[in-house]
Image (spheres, rainbow, N blue to C red):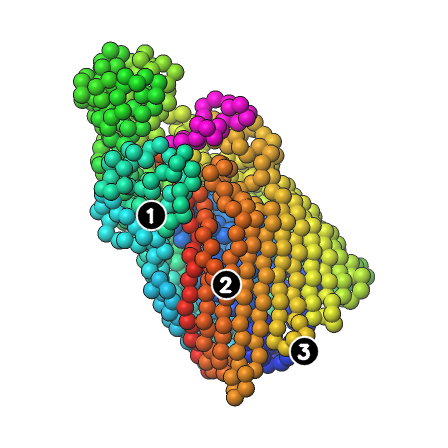
């Protein structure tokens, strides 16, 4: 009977979770085995050790002990996984085995899929909020396209939340911590009738920012950044109208209104005097000797606001119908989700008023998504079978803008004249020389005289208009239909073969309007009108100088430019696995899987030289993956030990790179990721003590390629460090370890502690692999001490995240317009990079500092 089964499953899950991973102590550790660890990695409940996939499964108690509230926190428990955030909370990227897609552009989809209660979240921004009450999280490594669909070419984060219970209960949690942290959340669950149960969760969280802000020229007034201010509510109904049917309805809403996120300088180049001269105060971190790394600091510079406003809402309905005559279950999963985000940005992250965006809706995007999935799954004595269909409709809208500050024109003049002064010291370094290039009917002699006098003579041309420069809009529509099947045939009691296939059909179209406003583009036109005079005086330097007048945000060619494209593609993906159980304690397996990540459009201004790129399309990404592993259950089934070798080859890997002036999406012909995953879980003989952890060794390398292999060969100089090199965010070694201990203290009390640690060897945090973006090896440690009653009526936690206050960089990037790293000609090392000529200022988004506090939980 379904109702009885569900009630029993709910109770069993609570007991197993408490005994296995944490605090309740309903039974001793010796009574628990790894057979109790259940996963749904193949869309059906199975013991972890029976699944021929690399899965890291994390229970509610494990997540709680490690302080996991969202997916960014999850990486401390998962070897081989990194999660980073950049210019907003919406710009969060997960990578597994060194593979993922970074970017602040909604035209890009992730290589690591996020699935919450069976519903695929199509963009990272839609999956990286507060997760509420969790039952468990499963991290599936490697391509998972057969069952979880496209855009899971590197893996899946499968999140299962707590469902309604027919046993009445409620809980509440209050937290206070440093940086002014304060949060309150709670839930209530129970029956509304004999067949209907509910659960309602709500939470609110606030915290001051991790960064101090020097506001420079203003008008920004906020003196901190990366704060937290959000609330969320999530309601569920579970209806069991009969013994053979169940319905689970979920509705949720979240809202954020915060300031996030500024970049800080990690290396400051020779443009510093110009920023300093135009700013109130220094304007940015002063450079180190020889333009080396500057001291680590959480002091950032931003004269403009970085407000972010995010709203996320959605509903889903899962229906299950037992079909006893077929020994099968029909599942229908329907969802609708709408996400919107607006953001303000100090584009240059300095105290000078150079360029910015407002958080008034002119810079942001929205995602609306409808999905429908049907699955029919059944079993015979020898065959576990599943067939299904998945359909999704997605609409993306994006607004993009650019505003010129009062310092933009003089700053660009400083940059150009400093470059020219290096070639001819007679030409003055000046903030007033832009008018030399834009004067009507300028001559060679007039330009020479103007540059010599710093713009005082033969100048008078126009500069860049203050305020709004452009306002672009994009709308992308996509439809995806997939048919899939996954079947496991039990050849013998020891030998299984699994065959999965998925055929996906994608259609996408984009329309956009790129519009210069407020006379923007006139400065570009004025300079181009003087191309003959500029070329006559500057010779080979002229194209680069002209290019600075016609950068994507100032290029007259984008004015009233319409974008309209459509494309469709289809792909057959799938997997074949063979597993053999040597004995009840040891299973070996081999597998092949092909994953697929769909094509897309770069929803941005893209140009080659000063000519807008005709097409924004980039092709689909595919991966071929081979694995061989062994899963062992040892020590009277109290120890789990799994080891897997993996070999993955990605073709047309979608790489998004910020070049300091624009985001460029290129398809890299080949990226390989090879290595070993190992993990363990041990219920030790010591009552209440469990140990878990894992290690991943990864060699993630780009194949060799040349300019002709790229969609736009002109992008090759900035990508010339990639051929044959280790990919960014791909540490060679990554390891996680957790220790959990709790026991009775007598007098109705129970106490315990937990430690979690994550080590990563050195890796590069920049898509272009500039050496100045390298991150040294580091270790993060989280800790928690708990005391409470045996029945968990109350529990008090003392906790700390990043206990040792490790200082590290999440993502480093080229500071806009502040120097250059790559040269225009091939250098002695065979690339376009020469460290002796590197003048690029590097900014970075930092990892969170040490946080600590108290959490009180009550439960009835």
Label 3 to label 2, Cα distance in Å? 28 Å
Up/down of 669 relative to 174, above or below: above
Label 3: few (<14), some (14–19) or many (≥20) C-alpha neighbours in 10 Å: few
Check if residue 682 falls in the magenta segment.
no
Predominant secondary structure, magenta span: loop
Element marked by disc 1:
strand
Query: Is any part of residue 512 visible from this angle?
Result: no
Q: What residue is shown at x 49% (from left), y 80% (from top)?
A: 788
Q: Residue at x 39, y 73 (%)?
A: 174
Name the side, left or right, on which 824 lies relative to 308. right
Q: Nearer the viewer, mark 3 or mark 2?
A: 2
> Could you tell me if residue 793 is visible in this image?
yes
Structural distance between the alpha carbons of marks 2 and 1:
26 Å
Residue 492 placement (x, y as % from top left)? 81, 61
Q: Which residue position is annotated with label 2?
A: 782
Q: Which mark is residue 244?
A: none
Residue receiving disc 3: 31
Q: Residues within 10 Å of mark 2 (few under 14, many from 20)?
A: many
Helix, strand, or loop for circle 2? strand
Which image quadrant: the N terminus?
Answer: bottom right
- In the rendering, at what x and y percent does residue 603 appear? 41, 40
Q: Which residues are magenta?
A: 819-841
Q: Residue furthest front?
A: 289
User: Which of the two residues, 260 or 772, is positioned nearer the viewer here?
Assistant: 772
Q: Earlier in the sequence, mark 2 or mark 1?
A: 1
Q: Earlier in the sequence, mark 1 or mark 3?
A: 3
Q: Tell me: residue 603, above or below residue 11.
A: above
Crowding near pointer 1: few (<14 within 10 Å), some, many (20+)? many
Give the spatial CA distance, label 1 vs label 3. 53 Å
> Would you name the residue on which mark 1 appears?
300
Does the CB distance between marks 1 and 3 fall below 8 Å? no
């Amino acid at each position: 009977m379904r109702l009885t089964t569900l009630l029993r499953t709910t109770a069993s899950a609570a007991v197993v979770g408490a005994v296995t991973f944490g605090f309740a102590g309903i039974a001793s550790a010796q009574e628990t085995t790894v057979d109790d660890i259940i996963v749904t990695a193949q869309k059906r409940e199975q013991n972890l050790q029976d699944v021929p996939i690399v899965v890291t499964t994390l229970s509610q108690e494990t997540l709680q002990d490690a302080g996991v509230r969202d997916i960014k926190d999850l990486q401390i428990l998962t070897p081989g996984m990194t999660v980073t955030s950049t210019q907003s909370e919406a710009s969060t990227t997960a990578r597994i085995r060194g593979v993922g897609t970074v970017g602040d552009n909604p035209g890009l989809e992730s290589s690591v899929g996020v699935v919450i209660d069976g519903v695929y979240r199509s963009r990272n921004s839609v999956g990286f909020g507060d997760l509420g009450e969790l039952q468990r999280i499963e991290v599936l490594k490697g391509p998972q396209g057969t069952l979880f669909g496209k855009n899971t070419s590197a893996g899946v984060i499968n999140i299962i939340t707590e469902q309604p219970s027919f046993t009445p209960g409620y809980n509440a949690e209050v937290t206070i911590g440093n940086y002014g942290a304060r949060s309150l959340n709670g839930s209530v669950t129970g029956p509304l009738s004999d067949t209907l149960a509910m659960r309602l969760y709500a939470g609110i969280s606030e915290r001051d920012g991790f960064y101090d802000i020097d506001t420079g020229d203003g008008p920004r007034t906020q003196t901190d950044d990366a704060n937290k201010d959000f609330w969320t509510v999530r309601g569920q109904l579970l209806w069991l109208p009969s013994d053979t049917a169940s319905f689970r309805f979920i509705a949720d809403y979240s809202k954020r209104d915060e300031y996030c996120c500024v970049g800080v300088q990690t290396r400051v180049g020779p443009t510093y005097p110009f920023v300093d001269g135009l700013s109130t105060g220094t304007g940015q971190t002063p450079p180190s000797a020889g333009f080396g790394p500057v001291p680590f600091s959480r002091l950032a510079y931003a004269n403009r606001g970085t407000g972010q406003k995010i709203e996320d809402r959605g509903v889903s309905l899962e229906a299950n119908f037992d079909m006893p005559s077929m020994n099968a279950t029909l599942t229908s999963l329907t969802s609708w989700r709408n996400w919107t985000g607006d953001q303000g940005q100090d584009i240059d992250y300095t105290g000078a008023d150079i360029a910015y965006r407002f958080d008034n809706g002119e810079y942001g995007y929205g995602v609306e998504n409808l999905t429908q999935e049907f699955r029919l799954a059944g079993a015979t004595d020898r065959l576990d079978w599943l067939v299904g269909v998945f359909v999704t409709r997605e609409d993306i809208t994006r607004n993009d803008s650019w505003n010129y500050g009062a310092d933009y024109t003089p700053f660009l003049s400083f940059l150009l004249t400093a470059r020219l002064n290096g070639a001819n010291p007679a030409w003055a370094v000046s903030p007033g020389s832009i008018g030399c290039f834009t004067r009507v009917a300028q001559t060679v002699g007039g330009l020479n005289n103007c540059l010599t006098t710093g713009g005082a003579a033969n100048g008078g041309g126009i500069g860049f208009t203050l305020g709004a420069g452009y306002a672009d809009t994009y709308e992308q529509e996509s439809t995806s239909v997939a048919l899939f099947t996954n079947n496991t045939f039990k050849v013998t009691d020891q030998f299984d073969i699994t065959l999965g296939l998925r055929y996906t059909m994608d259609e996408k179209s984009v329309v956009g309007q790129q519009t210069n406003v407020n006379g923007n583009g006139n400065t570009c036109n004025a300079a181009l009108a003087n191309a003959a005079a500029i070329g006559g005086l500057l010779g080979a330097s002229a194209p680069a100088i002209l290019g600075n007048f016609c950068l994507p945000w100032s290029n007259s060619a984008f004015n009233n430019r319409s974008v309209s494209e459509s494309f469709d593609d289809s792909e057959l993906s799938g997997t074949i696995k063979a597993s053999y159980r040597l004995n009840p304690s040891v299973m070996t397996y081999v597998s092949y899987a092909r994953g697929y990540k769909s094509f897309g459009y770069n929803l941005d201004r893209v140009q080659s030289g000063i000519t807008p790129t005709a097409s924004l399309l980039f092709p689909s990404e595919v991966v071929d993956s081979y694995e061989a592993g062994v899963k062992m259950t040892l020590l009277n089934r109290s120890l789990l030990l799994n080891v897997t070798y993996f070999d993955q080859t990605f073709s047309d890997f979608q790489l998004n790179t910020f070049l300091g002036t624009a985001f460029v999406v290129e398809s890299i012909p080949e990226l390989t990721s090879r290595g070993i995953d190992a993990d363990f879980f041990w219920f030790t003989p010591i009552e209440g003590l469990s140990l878990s952890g894992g290690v991943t060794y990864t060699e993630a390398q780009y194949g060799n390629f040349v300019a002709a292999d790229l969609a736009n060969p002109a992008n090759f100089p900035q990508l010339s460090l990639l051929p044959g090199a280790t990919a960014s965010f791909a540490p060679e070694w990554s390891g996680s370890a957790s220790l959990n201990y709790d026991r009775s203290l007598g007098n109705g009390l129970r106490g315990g502690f937990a430690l979690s640690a994550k080590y990563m060897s050195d890796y590069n945090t920049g898509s272009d692999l500039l050496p100045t973006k390298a991150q040294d090896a580091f270790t993060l440690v989280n800790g928690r001490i708990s005391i409470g009653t045996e029945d968990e009526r109350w529990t008090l936690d003392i906790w700390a995240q990043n206990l040792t206050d490790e200082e590290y960089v999440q993502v480093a990037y080229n500071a806009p317009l502040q120097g250059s790293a790559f040269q225009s000609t091939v250098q002695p090392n065979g690339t376009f990079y020469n460290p002796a000529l590197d003048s690029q200022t590097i900014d970075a988004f930092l990892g969170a500092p040490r946080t600590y506090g108290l959490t009180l939980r009550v439960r009835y």
